[in-house]
Image (cartoon, rainbow, N blue to C red):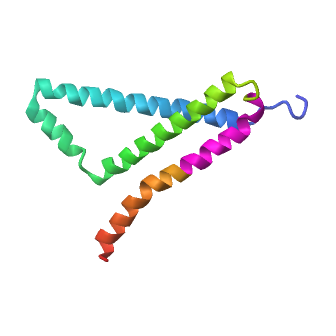
Amino acid sequence: MPAGTLYRGREGMWSWVAHRVTGVLIFFFLFVHVLDTALVRVSPEDYDKVVSTYKTPVVSLLEYGLVAAILFHALNGLRIIAVDYWTQGPRYQKQMFWSVMVLWVILMAGAVYPVLGHAARVLFGS
């Protein structure tokens, strides 16, 4: 095989994989959400039990993961639209990918920072 012909997975492939993974995670969340909400019609007591399990630190972390997945999926979706419909899109897809990543990190830091600040005040008292 000639040198340079083996595709090694650059930004385009990794954004494709991440877009699919986040899409599946969001779909799974929506599926579970519909099921647990439908439970209120079947058994309100069981619904209350299920919802009470959501009030744990682990689920709080999963909720931040959900926010991260939705935010990445949305930003990357806009990048995909630009690549598909802007004539210069394919030429600048690498720069747009890194722009999406930087914006995603900034927005996620903004989402997590208040929570970490509150946790530090509760744990260390100030």
Q: Residue at the spot x=61%, y=42% of the render?
A: 100
Q: Position of residue 113 (x, y in %)?
A: 43, 60
Q: Which corner quadrant of the image does residue 6 belong to?
A: top right
- Left or right of 26, for residue 124: left
Residue range of the region highlighted in magenta in the rendering: 90-105
Q: Residue furthest right?
A: 2
In the rendered image, the vertical position of residue 23 relative to residue 109, given as above or below: above
Q: Is residue 105 visible?
A: yes
Q: Residue at the spot x=69%, y=33% of the render?
A: 12
Q: Position of residue 17 (x, y in %)?
A: 59, 32
Q: Residue furthest bottom?
A: 126
Find out whether residue 11 is within the magenta segment. no
- Magenta part, dominant SS: helix
- Left or right of 47, for residue 11: right
- Left or right of 88, for residue 114: left
Q: Position of residue 123 (x, y in %)?
A: 31, 71
Residue 101 or 45: which is nearer the viewer?
101
Q: Quadrant of the C terminus?
A: bottom left
Residue 60 or 86: which is nearer the viewer?
86
Residue 125 or 35: which is nearer the viewer?
125
Q: How many marks?
A: 0
Q: Which corner quadrant of the image does residue 1 belong to?
A: top right
Q: Is residue 10 visible?
A: no
Find out whether residue 101 is within the magenta segment. yes
Q: Position of residue 10 (x, y in %)?
A: 72, 38
Q: Residue at the spot x=36%, y=33% of the render?
A: 29
Q: Residue at the spot x=21%, y=44% of the render?
A: 53
Q: Which corner quadrant of the image does residue 83 belong to?
A: top right
- Left or right of 91, for residue 96: left
